[in-house]
Image (tube, grey):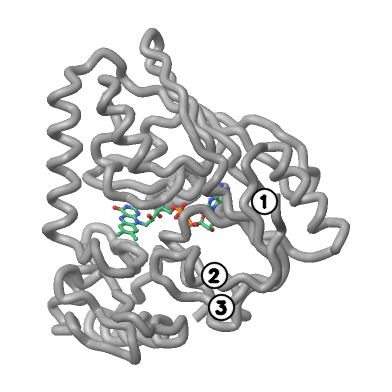
C-alpha cells in the first residue's frame, strides 16, 4: 500500500472541494489500516478517517497529518438462512442496498441513493424516508485510534439519534458492520421499490451535480429545505457555490467553488433563517481542516 504525500482532497469529496492532505493512504485490509495508525503514531501526526467524502466540507488549506480513506476496504457477505449481512466499512451503501434487493433481503431499499460508505453511514446514522441505518444494524467492529486494538460494540452502545452516533467523537475507525435484514422477500418487488426510490431522488435532488446532500439538519418538526425556499434563497450564489434551484437544502458546486464560498453561503442561510425565525440551522455536514467552527 502506498502512502502518498501532498494529495488534493477535492477528488475525495462529493463536493469536489478541499485542499491537500499532508499524507493519504487507502488500506485494503484491517492489517493495513492498523499499520497506518502505527505509522502516524511513530511520526506523531494526527490521523483522520474518510469514507466516500459525501458529508464532508474540507478546508481550502487542506488537512495536516494522515488521511486514511476507507473506500478500498469493501465487500459484503449475505446469509440467507439468518438474514445476517456482514459488510466492510468501505463498502458503498448503494452497492449494499442493490445487492440486498437482488438477493431478496428486505431492509435497505431506502438507502439506494445515499452515496456514502457503510462506515460513514454508521457514523452519521444516515437515513431517509423515516428509516435509518441504526434500524438494521446489530454491531460494529471498530479499531480504537489510541490503542490500535480491534473490538466490537453492539448497536445499543453507539448512542444513535437523528444523524447522530457516539462514533462522531472520532475515537474509532469502523472496520466492518453486521446487519440483520429480512431474507426471503420477493426479489422483483424489492428491486422495483429500490429503483423507484432512486428515480424519486433523481427527480427531486440535483443528483448529477457536486454536493454533499442536505447541508442542514431538519429542525424538527420543520424542514430546513422549506425554510430556505420560503426565504426566496434558491439560486443564490457566492463564488462557485449555489443554493440548488431543485432542492433548497442542497448547495451545489458550479465547478469552481471553494470551501470559503461554501462556508459563506452556509453562514448567509443561517443568518437569514435566524433573522426570520429566531433560531439557528445546524449543519449536518462535517468539517475537516478548519481551525474553528463557524
Ligand atoms: C447526493 C447526496 C445525497 C445524500 N442523501 C443523504 C440522505 O438521504 N440521508 C443521509 O443521511 N445522508 C445523505 N447524504 C450525506 C452522506 O451521503 C451520508 O452522511 C453518508 O453516510 C456519509 O458517508 P461517507 O462515507 O461519505 O462519510 P464521509 O463524508 O467520508 O465522513 C463523514 C464522517 O464519518 C467519518 N467516517 C467515515 N468513514 C468512517 C469509518 N470507516 N470509520 C470512522 N469514521 C468514519 C468521517 O471521519 C466523518 O466524520 C447525501 C449526500 C449526497 C452527496
User: Residue 173 at x, y = what percent?
Assistant: 63, 46
Can you identify the residue that label 1 sits on?
171
- Disc 2, ligand 1: is the CB inside 8 Å? no
Q: Nearer the viewer, mark 3 or mark 1?
A: 3
Of mark 3 and mark 2, the one earlier in the sequence is: 2
In-front residue for pair 209/148? 209
Q: CA distance from mark 2 to mark 1?
A: 22 Å
Can you identify the residue that label 2 sits on?
9
Give the image quarter of residue 55.
Answer: bottom left
- Where's ligand 1: which quadrant? bottom left
Residue plotted at (71% across, 58% down): 3
User: Residue 133 at x, y = what percent?
Assistant: 38, 39
Can you identify the residue that label 3 sits on?
19
Question: Image height check: is 111 above or below 80?
Answer: below
Left or right: 94, with 225 as reference point: right
- Disc 1, ligand 1: is the CB inside 8 Å? no
Q: Answer few, some or many: residues within 10 Å of disc 2's Cα (few below 14, many 20 plus, some between 14 and 19).
A: many
Amino acid at each position: 500500500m502506498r502512502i502518498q504525500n501532498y494529495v488534493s482532497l477535492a477528488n475525495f469529496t462529493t463536493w469536489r472541494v478541499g485542499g491537500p492532505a499532508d499524507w493519504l493512504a487507502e488500506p485494503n485490509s484491517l492489517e493495513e489500516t492498523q499499520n497506518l495508525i502505527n505509522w502516524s503514531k511513530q511520526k506523531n501526526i494526527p490521523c483522520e478517517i474518510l469514507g466516500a467524502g459525501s458529508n464532508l466540507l474540507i478546508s481550502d488549506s487542506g488537512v495536516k497529518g494522515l488521511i486514511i480513506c476507507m473506500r478500498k476496504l469493501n465487500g459484503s457477505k449475505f446469509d440467507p438462512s439468518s438474514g445476517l449481512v456482514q459488510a466492510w466499512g468501505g463498502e458503498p451503501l448503494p452497492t449494499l442496498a442493490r445487492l440486498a434487493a437482488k438477493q431478496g433481503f428486505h431492509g435497505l431499499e431506502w438507502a439506494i441513493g445515499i452515496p456514502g460508505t457503510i462506515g460513514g453511514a454508521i457514523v452519521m446514522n444516515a437515513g431517509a424516508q423515516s428509516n435509518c441505518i441504526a434500524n438494521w444494524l446489530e454491531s460494529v467492529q471498530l479499531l480504537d485510534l489510541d490503542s490500535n486494538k480491534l473490538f466490537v460494540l453492539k448497536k445499543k452502545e453507539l448512542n444513535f439519534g437523528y444523524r447522530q452516533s457516539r462514533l462522531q467523537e472520532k475515537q474509532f475507525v469502523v472496520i466492518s458492520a453486521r446487519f440483520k435484514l429480512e431474507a426471503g422477500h420477493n426479489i422483483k418487488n424489492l428491486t422495483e421499490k429500490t429503483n423507484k426510490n432512486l428515480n424519486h431522488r433523481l427527480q427531486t435532488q440535483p443528483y448529477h451535480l457536486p454536493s454533499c446532500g442536505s447541508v442542514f439538519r431538519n429542525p424538527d418538526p420543520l424542514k430546513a429545505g422549506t425554510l430556505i425556499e420560503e426565504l426566496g434563497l434558491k439560486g443564490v450564489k457566492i463564488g462557485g457555490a449555489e443554493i440548488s434551484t431543485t432542492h433548497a437544502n442542497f448547495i451545489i458546486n458550479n465547478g469552481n467553488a471553494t470551501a470559503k464560498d461554501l462556508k459563506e453561503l452556509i453562514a448567509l442561510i443561517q443568518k437569514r433563517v435566524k433573522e426570520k425565525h429566531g433560531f439557528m440551522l445546524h449543519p449536518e455536514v462535517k468539517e475537516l481542516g478548519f481551525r474553528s467552527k463557524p
